């Protein structure tokens, strides 16, 4: 199984530490693929939405996790409905 993680790059330092531990200890029997989107995309909601939709379409994975701030886009619930993904939203 392939697990894709799409995250804002604000989380990259912390996520890379966690992923290194997961890989080192072989905690999951799956391939992990991480895609980071640039910081400050939320300053233009149209760009953020387009970048997320494009990235989700391009990630070839069996399962997807989105790691983004819950307040970064007021329409997350609307435009992410059609995707089967786990969401980790902070703040």
Image (cartoon, rainbow, N blue to C red):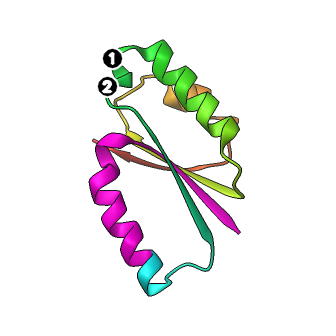
Q: Give the left or right position of residue 36, taking residue 86 as reference.
A: left
Badge 1: residue crowd in 10 Å (few <14, some 14–19, many ≥20): few
* Viewport quadrant of the N terminus: bottom right
Residue 31 highlighted magenta (yes or no): no
What residue sits right under mark 2 in the picture?
A: 40
Contact check, label 2 and label 1, Cβ < 8 Å:
yes
Say if 55 sits above or below 28 in the image.
Answer: above
Question: Is disc 2 placed on a helix, strand or loop?
Answer: loop
Say if 76 sits above or below 86 in the image.
Answer: above
Most frequent secondary structure within the magenta stretch: helix
Q: Which residues are magenta?
A: 1-22
What residue sits right under mark 1 in the picture?
A: 43
In the rendering, at what x and y percent does residue 36 appear?
A: 45, 43
Residue at image point 50% right, 84% down: 26
Say if 54 sits above or below 27 in the image.
Answer: above
Residue at image point 29% right, 42% down: 10
Question: Is disc 1 placed on a helix, strand or loop?
Answer: helix
């Amino acid at each position: 199984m392939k697990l894709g993680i799409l995250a804002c790059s604000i989380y990259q330092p912390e996520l890379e530490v966690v992923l290194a531990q997961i890989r080192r200890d072989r905690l999951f029997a799956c391939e992990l693929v991480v895609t980071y989107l640039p910081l400050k995309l939320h300053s233009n909601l149209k760009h953020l939405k387009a970048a997320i939709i494009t990235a989700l379409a391009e990630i070839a994975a069996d399962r997807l996790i989105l790691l983004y701030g819950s307040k970064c886009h007021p329409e997350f619930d609307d435009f992410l409905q059609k995707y089967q993904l786990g969401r980790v939203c902070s703040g």
